[in-house]
Image: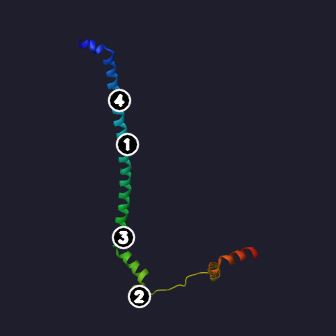
């Protein structure tokens, strides 16, 4: 009797249906696994880049703690100098003609700028 049930069309259809469901389930799980692996690899690259930035920041902090940096900042920002040294202040170079023309051009009204554009 068991052999007759296995040979029937409904048992074959049921077997094929179970096989299709199993294949579908494994395909779905494989797809999810690939997506998760993709997310993990993206997060790993982000971790690597953040670790690199962290290393740079730590190096910068250690540089800020050195006397060389502190002396440079004291000289630059506070105008301090060591004993026996003297500071020299140089004038900033700017061409007065260029800056004056730019300043005057910005102060003119829009109507005057159009008038000068067409009639000069």
Circles 2 and 4, Cβ within 8 Å, touching? The answer is no
Residue at 39% x, 87% y is 83
Identify residue for label 3. Answer: 63
Q: Name the mark on residue 84.
A: 2
Closer to the camera, 85 or 101?
101
Q: Name the mark on residue 23.
A: 4
At mark 1, the secondary structure is helix
Q: Crowding at label 1, few (<14), some or many (≥20) Cα neighbours within 10 Å?
A: few
Quarter that holds the N terminus: top left
Label 2 to label 1, Cα distance in Å? 68 Å
Residue at 38% x, 75% y is 69
At mark 4, the secondary structure is helix
x and y percentages locating residue 22 in the rendered image: 32, 29
Front position among marks 2 and 1? 1
Horizontal side of residue 83 vs 88, given as left or right? left
**Quadrant position of residue 13:** top left
Closer to the camera, 96 or 93?
96
Label 1 to label 4, Cα distance in Å? 18 Å
x and y percentages locating residue 48 in the rendered image: 36, 54
Q: Earlier in the sequence, mark 3 or mark 1?
A: 1
Residue at 65% x, 76% y is 110
Front position among marks 3 and 1? 1
Identify residue for label 1. Answer: 35
Q: Earlier in the sequence, mark 1 or mark 4?
A: 4
At mark 2, the secondary structure is loop
Label 2 to label 4, Cα distance in Å? 86 Å
Circles 3 and 1, Cβ within 8 Å, touching? The answer is no
Front position among marks 3 and 2? 3
């Amino acid at each position: 009797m068991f052999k007759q049930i296995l040979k029937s069309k409904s048992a074959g259809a049921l077997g094929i249906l179970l096989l299709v469901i199993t294949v579908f389930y494994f395909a779905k799980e494989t797809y999810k696994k690939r997506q998760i692996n993709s997310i993990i690899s993206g997060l790993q690259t982000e971790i690597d880049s953040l670790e690199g930035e962290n290393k740079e920041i730590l190096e910068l902090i250690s540089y800020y703690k050195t006397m060389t940096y502190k002396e440079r900042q004291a000289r630059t920002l506070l105008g301090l100098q060591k004993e026996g040294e003297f500071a020299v202040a140089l004038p900033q170079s700017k061409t007065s003609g260029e800056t004056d023309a730019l300043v005057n051009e910005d102060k003119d009204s829009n109507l005057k700028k159009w008038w000068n554009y067409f009639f000069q």
